[in-house]
Amino acid sequence: MHIVDRRLNPGGKSLANRQRFLRRVKDVAQRAVRESAREKDIKDLGKDGRVSVPADGVREPRFSRQPGSGLQDHILPGNKTYVEGDRIERPPGGGGGGGGAGEGGDGSENSEDAFQFVLTREEFLELFLEDLELPDLAKRRLAVVESEGLRRAGYTVTGSPANLALTRTLRNSMSRRIALKRPKPDELAALEARIAELREGDPALPDLELSLELLRERSKRIPYVDPIDLRYRRFEPYPRPVAQAVMFCLMDVSGSMTEHMKDLAKRFYILLHIFLTRRYRHVEIVFIRHTDRATEVDEETFFSSRETGGTLVSSALVEMKRVITERYDPNDWNIYAAQASDGDNVSSDGPTATELLRSHILPACQHFAYLEVGDENGPRAGFVEHRTTLWRTYEGIAKSGGAIAMRKVNHRREIYPVFRELFGRKDARAEAEA
Amino acid sequence: MVGSLSRATSRSVSGSAEPLFTGNDWDFDTIRRIHDACEAVAGPELGLSWYPNQIEIITAEQMLDAYASIGMPLFYKHWSFGKHFAQHEAGYRRGLMGLAYEIVINSDPCISYVMEENTATMQTLVIAHAAFGHNHFFKNNYLFRQWTDAEGILDYLDFAKGFISRCEERHGHQAVEQVLDAAHALMSQGVHRYPRKKRPDLASEQRRERERIEHGEQIYNDLWRTLPSKPGAVRSDAAAERRRALLELPQENILYFLEKVAPRLRPWQREILRIVRLVAQYFYPQRQTKVMNEGCATYVHYRIMNALSEKGQIGEAAYLEFLQSHTNVIRQPNYDDRSYGGHNPYAIGFAMMQDIARIAENPTDEDRAWFPEIAGVGDGMGVLRDIWANYRDESFIAQFLSPKLIRDLRLFHVVDDPDEPELRVEAIHDERGYRRLRRSFARQYDVAWLDPDIEVVDVDLEGDRRLILHHKALNRITLQKDDARRVLQHLADLWGYDAVLKEVDPATGSVLAEHTASARPIFF
């Protein structure tokens, strides 16, 4: 008899089956995931990935007999009062005596018509963010997104002492010493001891002294470490993709921004954050809020506190530029910026903001998104859609070729579609349009 | 149930052997001691023979894994297993479903998976049940000996898994999935129910041909030539006859038929059909012996646990724990009980085994009249071993369900005829009813009777190549329409041309329903 402990075997043996299953129900699961993104708080996104799939897609049909057709026999245990020939009224619902008697095909269809299962957070986000892509990454990957790194690449015979590979060097030295038969220290010591033991005039003495002399000579000629033993660790430079990103959240916090608008902005930021963390190993966030002055704040203050004062968009841009120069070198960081505002701006600020964006901010950024948040009820009916000061300013930049993405959002259900529009994979979108 | 309890109270604790364990904890050493103690009972006392045991300790998650791949330690990948895993996992996490204490595999060596969270008593029970009870049954029952290859199954599954994953690499996941979907749909129509005729070799074929000619010469009479005949009809009949014979029609093993005959399948697709078919065939004996297999294992664990307790190798507390789970396992709710879900194979199996041992050892007059060949022979265990080797559920119940047990279970037979306004009680546990009850009860365990009887009857190879199948609608019970349509669609896809399924009433020959499907161009 053998006893085998399987408990330590790697788990997830049926992971491949699960992947096949998810692929099978992908369309449905994806729809469910997107729906839940619209309904739920974005904070809880992916926490409860319960998905219900209609049985049709995952039905495993078999030839089975129709319950309730034709003549059916039931053998039941526990007879109390019946005798042969008794008539029993048909129980409601058609089925056989005593409730179906557990026939194979019985009711299996009903239990299957909505199949529920739970997605893990990983699977959820995978479906949630599918076909989204970071914009313009390809262009920059060649030019800027890479930096040089060094990595080990074997050994070399030349190099600086700091890179000396000791183990390798000594290994070489040892094999050389063995190959050339360099006398070992204990051999010499043993010989010396023997000479010391022998008395003067012993006939063996001259021979021994001669061989000791020869051995000493030999160990002098064969050094312990020779220059040909030396090995140095070799490093070679390679292009290292920048695996870190910083996300700038800019928001107008002046009195005209309502809680609703801030909520919309927050949702957008959270989506962007989830998305970036999926793509980059390391993501930092910088919060900059502004009225007519801009300050960098922590998340708590950013979303909760309220300021009074005018609105000067360029102040936030100046602050962003300062933070970039101080901490985030565009060569090392992928910079993403998302600005949320209700669109108010002092009209005289337009040219300053344009200039700042065009010559400093946009060249440094991978992507700059402007989200104009509006009232919950949307633009009031009957009015021509009002274009805000800031919208017009940015529109000017976009028209003259600036890489800036702009969208308007009024209701939180529009956040996710807008986000998909901004980051949707280009070829996927092209296909959809074709 | 009553029997088991009364027996328990009358047992005497005479042994003074060292207990195998105390408390709930166990380690590998305990498991080994338990196994050896069970072996000492199973061999000399019960006379069982078994494949060498391999006991594997697994976690709950691994048990769920095993559930998803129908209990096998390795299996090919398919989405439906992922679906079952999700289903079981959801049930388990919400506490709706407990997991089995063990799973045992019909292989040589016989692998029993036992859960790590079982207590020491449960491990003893499980080892007695699976590693000796089921193991003995697998090794000795004629169906398993005839149809399954215990030595080769794991190697074959390994081959199947590798083959299908290579196919996925070469032909794409989707192509393989479509073949597997179709094959799975036809899985229960993929078994040979009877050993097939051996194909004659060339030499014996020649010999038979010669004999036939000689026989023809001997009985030749020129007078027959003068009989008038309808030349055209005879020839076409003969041609159809010959075609059907060549295709081995009618054929109830649809997967076999498609594997051998379907004109447009590629070799790898045929091989996949073969894999699914052989797996279905491997499991076919298990479907036919549920009651006996569980009855045998339950009876064996009951005997072993009692013997261990008598020797003092398990303590009082452990014995009570065993009794509690044993009575849970063999509980049979009455038909009007809310928890009734059909017959419990453990309950019926165990009750029948106990009943047979009773008949062999102290029979009543009634038993002598009903079972003259086993009543009073004395060696209950010997009778049981013989039965375990040579019967399946249907024949077992038809032969050995005793009037006493029918009375104990208070069985009755209800007929649901759609032409009548009410249900009719056909038989109850009385003198008039015993035999009829037993016959119809046995039939409920006849897999060939339970599965819809569907055969490929003909194919028009020269015309539109339409495949014709018949369902012999027993008692005019037709197939579930929706599923039948879907399965037929899969069948037509594999066949490559149209397929038609006629549901025929075997009594009158009238067609009750007809389904048709045309092949979709997905495989070719």
Image: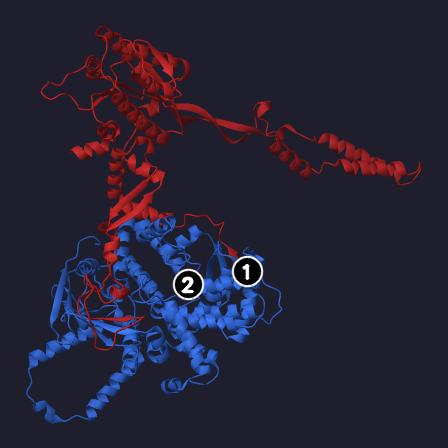
Chain colours: A red, B blue
Q: Residue furthest top?
A: A348
Q: CA distance from mark 1 to mark 2?
A: 24 Å
| Subunit under mark 1 | B
Q: Is B226 rendered above or below residue B388?
A: below
Q: Position of residue B438 (x, y in %)?
A: 30, 78
Closer to the chain start, of discs 1 and 2, is 1
Which residue sits at x=38%, y=16%? A297
Q: Residues within 10 Å of mark 2 (few under 14, many from 20)?
A: few
Q: Residue furthest front?
A: A81
Q: Position of residue A334 (x, y in %)?
A: 36, 22
Q: Quadrant of the N terminus of chain A?
A: bottom right
Using the image, tell me which numbered label, if any, was put on residue B368. none
Which residue sits at x=34%, y=77%? B407
Q: Is B436 rendered above or below residue A233?
A: below
> Label 2: which residue?
B328
Q: Position of residue A193 (x, y in %)?
A: 85, 37
Is B411 or B91 nearer to us in this picture? B411
